[in-house]
Amino acid sequence: MSDTNFQLLAIGVYFLAMIGIGYYAFRKTSSHEDYMLAGRGLNPMTAALSAGASDMSGWLMMGLPGAIYAAGLIEAWIAIGLTVGAYLNWLVVAPRLRAYTEVAQNSITIPSFFENRLHDRSRLLRIVSGLIILIFFTFYVSSGMVAGGVFFESSFDSNYQVGMLLVAGVTLLYTLFGGFLGASLTDVVQGLMMVIALVIVPLIAFFTVGGLSDVQDGISESGAELSGLFPANMDTLVWFGIISSLAWGLGYVGQPHIIVRFMALRSVASAKPARRISITWMIVSLVGAVVSGFIGIAYIQRSDVTLDNPETIVLVMSQALLHPFIAGLVLAAVLAAIMSTLSSQLIVCSSALVEDLYRVRAKEPPSQQRLVLLGRLCVLGVALVAILLALNPNDTILELVGFAWAGFGAAFGPIVLLSLFWRKLSNWGALVGMITGAVTVFLWDALEGWTDASIFTVYEILPGFLLNLVVAIVVSNMTYQENPELEDEFDTASELVTSVR
């Protein structure tokens, strides 16, 4: 059997395992809450690994090692910002969001939580939130499908459309039937595959090169001009670059596909062990990715292997150093990074359509069976639109990943924080602040292309987040009216979190 056949066999086994998990989740799903939130029954490990796997996508396995390979530690600032942001998100947001979403009429989506938390009778807050989710995530999902097609094209010299449709089809299959539970359980397997690959590949490459001194010599021999965390020439643009990289951490609190895992925890107390598991997974994975980039320089220098694209360094080393079947599992881990994010985003899009747009217009309460069916149809519909967008890819679609992260972080992040920790937030303050954050991201991104001013090189999440926060506070102070029921809910959520601590 050829090396390629061994690798394809490994990927085939992985696909079958994902479909099998999806079928298991299908058997466990009976209600709308099961389909959208796994009945609020996720244990800490499942929630932790699911949040991590759905967060990182292909950037962890390809983007970060490739950036380190090409430029050095200056590219690690994003990893630092993400780690700090993820830790604070689990520490501050997770327990309180889990408590408050249950107190606020058992909200199962972020838009429904905003509406129930703020007693918004206009329904505008929920509808606008749902539309923001739908717009950003449709392109986000499409970018993941593009990544899947490019993966098969570069790894096996296959047709782009065939590879894209294969990744989209398998992800759609287990998400369509397994729902949130299927996405979460497959995330656990995918998260473990990712971290194991990022430990094994650089470790074997390290000893193959000859140890620490040989790695250092190999990097020196390569002539690579690598920067440290603080380059020698620290001009304004470099500082703006570092600030922008760290600002990625702000986005966590506003990412619907990540914070929905907090809502699905089986209890408020589960947030603490989940935080420890998630951050441990994240640190090990990120360190493995960074180390892979550095060791990859020495390995390519000391071997006969050629590297056409720095982002494929982990794939190239695994194919050269491991048995073809094991190398195939590493390739599957890259697919896992892509597919875990895809499945989570499909579920969030479905929830936005069914829970936040359809149900607010329904004249009569629909049955659970009807809601589950609609949820599956919406997953299918969003996937088909994303597939159409991905059939003829262009360079800008992958850039939308960073743009969507900024959009969600700037639109939702401040409102999530204020909803949880400031009792005087009003529905109009939340609505105007949310729109301000989203619009700022669009305008800032456009201005970066229209002007040479260095300030516009700052990642758009930072001005969007800050303006949202200021506007929401100002408008809330102007429109807030005391509501005893709202005050009681705020106090009840606070007491739930305090009692656990």
Image (cartoon, rainbow, N blue to C red):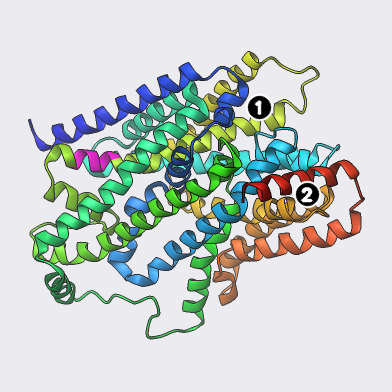
Q: Secondary structure at mark 2?
A: helix
Distance from disc 2 to disc 1, alpha carbons, whole Å, reads: 21 Å
Question: Is residue 392 visible in this depiction of the protein?
Answer: no
Image-quadrant location for residue 448: bottom right
- Give the residue at x 19% y 29%: 9
Kind of residue indicated by mark 2 = Leu
Question: Is residue 200 visible in this depiction of the protein?
Answer: yes
Q: Nearer the viewer, residue 258 or 490?
A: 490
CB atoms of marks 2 and 1 within 8 Å:
no
Residue 414 on image: x %, y %: 69, 56
Please give the range of residues in magenta.
Answer: 327-332
Residue 257 on image: x %, y %: 55, 42
Q: Which residue is mark 2?
A: 431
- Horizontal relation, residue 291 to residue 364: left or right: left
- Quadrant (top left/top right/bottom left/bottom right) for the N terminus: top left
- Horizontal relation, residue 200 to residue 67: left or right: left
- Horizontal relation, residue 293 to residue 352: left or right: left
Image-quadrant location for residue 308: bottom left
| Label total for image | 2
Q: Nearer the viewer, residue 135 or 219?
A: 219
Q: Secondary structure at mark 1?
A: helix
Prevailing SS of the magenta stretch: helix
Query: How many other residues sit within 10 Å of disc 2, few (<14), some (14-19) or many (≥20)?
Result: many
Q: Which residue is mark 1?
A: 354
Residue 214 on image: x %, y %: 11, 71
Residue 125 on image: x %, y %: 77, 42
Look at the picture and state if 108 lies above or below 451: above
Residue 456 colored in magenta in the image: no
- Give the residue at x 44% y 65%: 80
Kind of residue indicated by mark 1 = Val
